[in-house]
Amino acid sequence: MKARIHITLKSGVLDPQGKAIENALSGLGFGGIGNVRQGKYIELEIAEADAARARQKLDDMCRKLLANTVIENYAIEVAP
Protein backbone atom coordinates (compact mmCIF):
# COMPACT_ATOMS: atom_id res chain seq x y z
CA MET A 1 0.00 0.00 0.00
CA LYS A 2 1.34 3.43 -0.91
CA ALA A 3 1.18 6.32 1.54
CA ARG A 4 1.79 10.03 1.17
CA ILE A 5 2.36 12.30 4.16
CA HIS A 6 2.30 16.10 3.93
CA ILE A 7 3.84 17.94 6.87
CA THR A 8 3.43 21.70 7.30
CA LEU A 9 4.11 24.21 10.01
CA LYS A 10 1.12 25.22 12.09
CA SER A 11 -0.19 28.71 11.43
CA GLY A 12 1.46 31.25 13.68
CA VAL A 13 4.79 29.39 13.67
CA LEU A 14 7.54 31.42 12.02
CA ASP A 15 8.78 29.92 8.77
CA PRO A 16 12.26 31.31 7.97
CA GLN A 17 12.69 28.96 4.99
CA GLY A 18 9.39 30.12 3.56
CA LYS A 19 10.49 33.75 3.99
CA ALA A 20 13.82 32.99 2.26
CA ILE A 21 11.94 31.40 -0.66
CA GLU A 22 9.63 34.41 -0.83
CA ASN A 23 12.60 36.81 -0.92
CA ALA A 24 14.40 34.72 -3.55
CA LEU A 25 11.32 34.66 -5.78
CA SER A 26 10.98 38.41 -5.46
CA GLY A 27 14.68 38.81 -6.30
CA LEU A 28 14.15 36.75 -9.44
CA GLY A 29 11.41 39.12 -10.56
CA PHE A 30 8.36 37.12 -9.53
CA GLY A 31 6.07 39.78 -8.10
CA GLY A 32 2.87 39.39 -6.15
CA ILE A 33 4.19 36.51 -4.04
CA GLY A 34 3.50 36.52 -0.31
CA ASN A 35 3.06 34.38 2.78
CA VAL A 36 5.21 31.52 1.43
CA ARG A 37 5.18 28.47 3.69
CA GLN A 38 7.28 25.38 3.06
CA GLY A 39 6.83 21.86 4.31
CA LYS A 40 7.84 18.23 3.87
CA TYR A 41 6.45 15.50 1.65
CA ILE A 42 7.12 11.85 2.48
CA GLU A 43 6.08 8.95 0.26
CA LEU A 44 6.45 5.34 1.36
CA GLU A 45 5.20 1.81 0.86
CA ILE A 46 3.67 0.07 3.87
CA ALA A 47 3.13 -3.69 3.98
CA GLU A 48 -0.43 -3.62 5.27
CA ALA A 49 -3.56 -4.86 3.49
CA ASP A 50 -6.08 -3.10 5.75
CA ALA A 51 -6.27 0.67 5.04
CA ALA A 52 -7.45 1.50 8.57
CA ARG A 53 -4.53 -0.38 10.15
CA ALA A 54 -2.12 1.24 7.70
CA ARG A 55 -3.46 4.69 8.57
CA GLN A 56 -3.09 3.93 12.30
CA LYS A 57 0.53 2.82 11.83
CA LEU A 58 1.28 5.91 9.72
CA ASP A 59 -0.30 8.17 12.34
CA ASP A 60 1.90 6.52 14.97
CA MET A 61 4.98 7.07 12.76
CA CYS A 62 4.10 10.75 12.38
CA ARG A 63 3.56 11.27 16.09
CA LYS A 64 6.78 9.45 17.08
CA LEU A 65 9.23 10.51 14.36
CA LEU A 66 8.11 12.15 11.14
CA ALA A 67 6.40 15.29 12.46
CA ASN A 68 7.02 17.57 15.41
CA THR A 69 3.41 17.79 16.54
CA VAL A 70 4.14 20.81 18.75
CA ILE A 71 4.76 23.01 15.70
CA GLU A 72 3.68 20.89 12.69
CA ASN A 73 0.47 19.49 11.25
CA TYR A 74 0.38 16.43 9.03
CA ALA A 75 -2.04 14.87 6.57
CA ILE A 76 -1.97 11.21 5.51
CA GLU A 77 -3.15 9.81 2.16
CA VAL A 78 -3.35 6.04 1.67
CA ALA A 79 -3.79 4.37 -1.74
CA PRO A 80 -3.86 0.65 -2.57
Image (cartoon, rainbow, N blue to C red):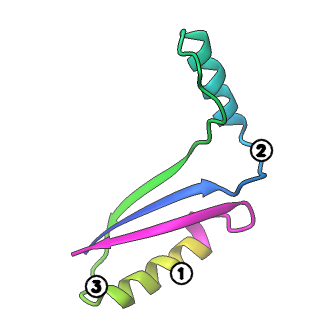
Q: Nearer the viewer, mark 2 or mark 3?
A: 2
Which residue is at the far front? 32
Q: Is residue 29 above or below residue 79?
A: above
Q: What secondary structure is marked by label 1?
A: helix
Mark 2 / mark 3, whichever is N-terminal: 2
Q: Is residue 7 above or below residue 14?
A: below
Q: What residue did someone put label 2 on?
A: 14
Q: Residues within 10 Å of mark 3 (few under 14, many from 20)?
A: some
- C-beta proximity under 8 Å, tags 2 and 3: no
Q: What secondary structure is marked by label 3?
A: loop
Tell me what residue is drawn at x 45 percent, y 77 percent. Answer: 58
Residues in magenta? 64-80
Tell me what residue is drawn at x 69 percent, y 31 percent. Answer: 19
Mark 1 / mark 2, whichever is N-terminal: 2
- C-beta proximity under 8 Å, tags 1 and 3: no
Find residue 25 and report its horizontal and vertical position in percent: 56, 19
Quarter of the rendering containing residue 80: bottom left
Q: Nearer the viewer, mark 1 or mark 2?
A: 2
Q: What residue did someone put label 1 on?
A: 60
Question: Which quarter shows the N terminus?
Answer: bottom left
Q: Is residue 67 magenta?
A: yes
- Residue 57 located left or right of residue 36: left
Q: Residues within 10 Å of mark 2 (few under 14, many from 20)?
A: few
> Rounded to the nearest whole Å, what is the CA distance between mark 1 and mark 2?
26 Å
Mark 1 / mark 3, whichever is N-terminal: 3
Q: What residue did someone put label 3 on?
A: 48
- Residue 41 located left or right of residue 39: left
